[in-house]
Amino acid sequence: MSHPSTLGHAVAPDGTTALDRGIALDARGIRFEGGPRLVLCASLFYFRLPREQWRARLAQVRASGYTCVDVYLPWNFHETAPGRWSFEGRRDVAAFLDLAQEEGLYVIARPGPYICSEWDGGALPAWLGLDPQLRVRQHEPRFLDRVTAWFDQALPLLVERQYPANGPVIMVQLENELDFFDCEDRTGYLTALRDQAVRHGITVPLIACSGQGDLEGATGDVPGVVPACNFYPDDDSPHIEPEVRRYAELLAERDLPLLITETNRRHRTLRRLLASGASLIAPYLQSSGWNFGYTPSAGNWGRPGNLMSHGYDFGGYVSSTGTERPEYAEAQILARVIDTLGPRLALATPTVPHTPVTTDFPTSSSPSALRLDGGGRLLAVPHLGTGAGAGTGAGTAVVNGVPVAVAADSCPLMLVDVPLAPWGHEGTLTLASADLVAAREGVLVFSSDVPVTVVVGDTRVEVPAPAPGAPGRATAEGLTLVALAPSDAVRLRSIDRNGSLHLDEPAPARQASAPVAVRRARRRAGTTVPERAAGRHELPPTLESLGVYRGRGTYRTTTDLTGVDELLLVGATDIVDLSVAGRVRPTIAGFGATRRIDVREATGSVDVEAVVEIWGHANFDDARLPALRLGALRGLGTLWTVRETADVSALWEVHGHWAGRPAPLRELGGWSSTRVGLPVTYTREIRTATAAALHLKGVVEPVRVTVADGEPHTDQEAHTVHAEDPWIPLPAGTHRVSVTLPHHPSGGGLRAELLGLDPVTDWTCSAQDDDLLTAFATEAAPGQEVQLPLGLAPGEEAWLDVDLPPSHDGLLLRPDGTQIRVTGWAGGECVGRVWVGDRPDFSGGDANVLWIPPGWSGLTLLVRGAAGPEVPELRVLRLESSD
């Protein structure tokens, strides 16, 4: 790792580096032109907000006390089709960055190329997957050529707005959490990205964040790329501090600060990170937003098979619709502590406390403290218990022999042995048990829900617990000590020398309007959505190959089901409504997992139709299901008729442990030994006259399967088979199949089933991308008023135009019904989709509402009936205020 003062950047004619004239990083922190600063940073994404709200949301972040926003730039938001670029309207990222500067905020820009962010494809354009030789997130020419085209568009916008000369950009992040991804040449890949950034003229620090603490895995240990850390701990864990301190120490060895580019949103945790040595603290999604249109991701990491909701909200201090939550005031208090301590805190170094601390409440297993520049320490004492409400359930900590009160669910930042000279007072603040939120000559102001213990020199006083509007007061050694309730502390404007306080007026309480039930709408009569013919194909093509990167398509064919009891659908994704012989089957949302479909009631030549909708492309690389791999394409997949089924669980040769030659024959998983947990391999020959699928029933833990042609010593194709999709495709021919699994004598065992298959062919396709659907939805159309509830048959669609009442803050629409999917458009954009009834898991915000931002006129809904346990019906539309 090179010294951070150079970082591979160009040297100016005066001999200084760009960082000498702008941002400098070293083990003690971040230095700006105006001096060192500890930075609080909130995620705020222009692409998840109406443009009309950009300035207000940025101002809201600044009013919280945070001084920076981190901003992803999603590649596929700006390259909407290959070579078609857009930086206008809601895509005008340059205007957003300029607004951030006007609002007094720094910016950490994160142009990817991969951003994750639970965004469609992690921002990698869907069409990249159409090139079978292109390998995303690798040091590979085809991918890097496309990245170059993106960086050529995005990086000049950042170069023009770098701090300090022309704008707010103080850091640029390359890639995102690469340590989660199987990149074969991390050094080569990150070097290529770094070189592009330097070539374009990026002079602020280049950073790369680790998602699970693998600094080298995230940066490739490339000179000029500063490692940053993302932490997502359990907020109640007592072990956060020693983990964070370890990374602070590792980075200090490289003369670098600890930059936490993502973490939890709770300020009790953020205080613990601060005390453990973080110079940048950027809780992820502190300010929430909205996934408009077809932009959510599919299959966010965790249990496979969930969809990201349109409301992109994980409980940060500002909701998706802009409402401030209680955590917002916690942000303001922490920011006041940081401002009050200023450079002394910004240049502090972490240590384990030398001050003895004991508590009668659950706390950190190894508390953290900071040595403040100029003397003294800041000590974090987290109370990990909870009371019945804020400020209740206080416990007692004994700090350096002095008992102090600590509120439940809090983490006061206590000051120990701090010289008071910078605040115009001789002497030492030996101990203060609460947050110091303001100070001037002769006056110290604290924020607390409980009594505050202050020791000045050897004089100890108790400042009574404040109440809203009723500060606690005391004096010691010529100092006036004031304790404010947090609700008052956030409104503190100024202090007089005599201790008088001036507070801003509280914001008026806003009354939420009562929900309105909409029971009437205009139904567009006899309306058929236009579709673009997409040709005839032997096998179903991917939607992306038809030019649909976001939207849906329809596949139609006729096939003979004489003597066929079931179909096998392989690779279908994301949302598939399959109709066979006029019967619509329950919606399939299996992310490419193989599905068996009973068709015993259909016979002879029948029509098959599938409407396939893209919810979003995978934002994380999850090998457990085909569609959850990063770069995986969407579509119907392949539909097969099952011609025969055979049990092939018996007659497997056993290899492993003491199995000798000739190899014993056992049932799959039936070998017994005393070596529990060691791998055993079962092999047998499988012959099939047609294409086939091998189904391993009973898979719990992943098993390894290799398939070779019947000839010995031929190349083997290896598969890892998971419980989520325990199928292996086999072409016609003779194969030696080997299944390797750990010996598990108390397990349930495996069964193997072989299905002989014939493909269903001759498909006619049509496409409806999001541009076509949006154009149709937003054009004026006649309709006839209908009264809700509205019943629909499975597969039937209705287009409804809905009149909205006026709203200053926007509206939330909550469809109520059974077995329906609702897509909404307003203000010329798709606002999102809601799925009511049987559906996959969702993550993120409230998956049951659509948001119509203020000023977005008109509302058009596409309602589609889905097969399921109940009859599809839209009962009522509920409108709620979004404040």
Image (cartoon, rainbow, N blue to C red):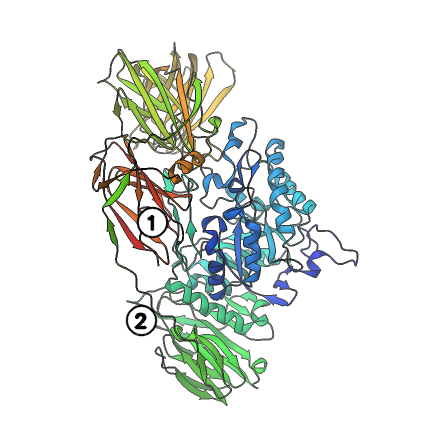
Q: Nearest to the eye among marks 1 and 2: give it.
A: 1
Image x and y of residue 704, in percent: 43, 28
10 Å crowding of disc 1: few (<14), some (14-19), many (20+)? some
Left or right side of 796 for 8: right
* Residue drawn 63% across the image and 68% down it: 35
Vertical arrangement, residue 709 with respect to residue 114, above or below: above
**What residue does disc 2 label?**
392
Image x and y of residue 121, in percent: 47, 38
What is the quadrant of the C terminus in the image? Answer: bottom left
Quarter assignment of residue 532: top left
Vertical arrangement, residue 319 with respect to residue 333, above or below: above
Vertical arrangement, residue 147 with respect to residue 571, above or below: below
Residue 611's mark? none
The amino acid pointed to by label 1 is Asp
Image x and y of residue 150, in percent: 59, 40
Left or right side of 738 for 348: right
Name the one closer to the observer, 870 or 780: 780
**What residue does disc 1 label?**
846
Image x and y of residue 613, in percent: 38, 32
The amino acid pointed to by label 2 is Thr
* Residue drawn 27% across the image and 37% down it: 820
* Residue drawn 42% across the image and 43% down it: 829
10 Å crowding of disc 2: few (<14), some (14-19), many (20+)? some
Mark 2: secondary structure: loop
